[in-house]
Amino acid sequence: LGPLLATNEEVRLTPPGGDVIGLRRLDTHFLGLGALGSVCSISDDGEIHIKASQSRLKGGDIFLDEASVTATENVLMAASLAQGESIISNAASEPHVQDLCNLLQCMGSSIEGVGSNRLLVRGKSHLHGCSFKIGSDYMEAGSFIGLAGASGGQMLIKGVEHEHLRMIRLGFERIGIRFVEDGPSSILVPRKQKRILCKEVGGHTAKIDDAPWPGFPADLLSIITVCATQMEGSILIHEKMFESRMYFVDWLIRMGADIILCDPHRAVVNGPSQLVGSQVSSPDVRAGMALVIAAVCAQGQSTIENIYQIERGYENLSGKLQALGLDIERLA
């Protein structure tokens, strides 16, 4: 949306789709792009209409009302082609946002504060092509850490950025899964794990919740949840961001998991549970991967429907799982 607006002055879009995890706010996008000199509206049928008030966007002082990854990226790209300087405060700073900053700089953009929550962008009249290598996907790495830990297998994961896994390491250690560095860009998830959920100081039930970077990623809470079903003890999973993400636990309960859904944002997982194969459906990319992990741990055969959701976030997933020795077949 940001690049389209910067190069076309006027944009009309159909309503966005994607994961079924709750309300996906567009307000932050409109707030940021509006500060650059655009007017945003939505028609009764949901069509988005954004128009620049002048022939070229103008730099502005932007304070986002939430540290949204996609809103930060949209505003960042638009500001790179706007006239003058832009300051983006309360910006998201996740690794993929940093990667976008690095790409834009490679294309000729001027950005200061990469990796922080305050970005200074000096707009250019045009950008140029470049050769760029995309960074590692810490979400995929975290998913495979969960797969190895939940199933009790050993796995060597290559092509990771150790710095991106620091908070992820703490989260997995809390549910009894550890991994070690095995070279400059590899980690090893060992076979022998304690498989015991840690308690808080004082013996209280442990809790894992999500937070903006560098906090624990919201997208990995689904993975943590299914892993906890295979560990001894109890843990509270608190999803603060989206009000429908945790509903996928109904599928895990159907497979035999002992999970109490306290409300749309919180679930208590009691383990270990022997999961059984079932027919389930993926509501979103991360819940879908969590169901794949559940199927690997379960006795018997499982069928997972709506897999296009999973494949949006995992390239050649069935091939990678087959390479690990798993009996998996893509039916359609």
Image (cartoon, rainbow, N blue to C red):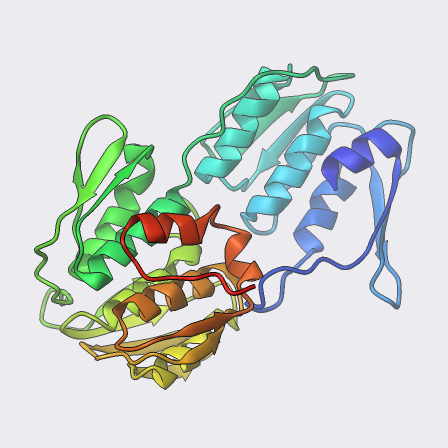
- What is the tally of numbered marks visible in this picture? 0
Q: The N terminus is located in which quarter? A: top right
Asked whether, in this view, residue 130 is left or right of residue 165, the answer is right
**Residue 232 versus residue 304: which sits nearer the camera?**
304
Q: Position of residue 265 (x, y in %)?
A: 44, 73
The correct choice, above or below, for 65 with respect to 42 in the image is: above
Q: Position of residue 228 (x, y in %)?
A: 24, 69
**Residue 313 versus residue 235: which sits nearer the camera?**
313
**Residue 23 versus residue 309: which sits nearer the camera?**
309
Q: Position of residue 131 (x, y in %)?
A: 57, 17
Asked whether, in this view, residue 128 is left or right of residue 301, the answer is right
User: Which residue is pictured at 56% across the width and 68% down the height?
Assistant: 306
Viewer can see residue 201: yes
Q: Position of residue 184 (x, y in %)?
A: 24, 26
Asked whether, in this view, residue 133 is left or right of residue 225, the answer is right
The correct choice, above or below, for 153 with respect to 287 in the image is: above
Viewer can see residue 60: no
User: Which residue is pictured at 52% across the width and 73% down the height?
Assistant: 244
The correct choice, above or below, for 126 with respect to 154 in the image is: above
User: Which residue is pictured at 80% across the width and 28% down the height?
Assistant: 58
Asked whether, in this view, residue 198 is left or right of residue 145, the answer is left
User: Which residue is pictured at 67% across the width and 28% down the height?
Assistant: 86
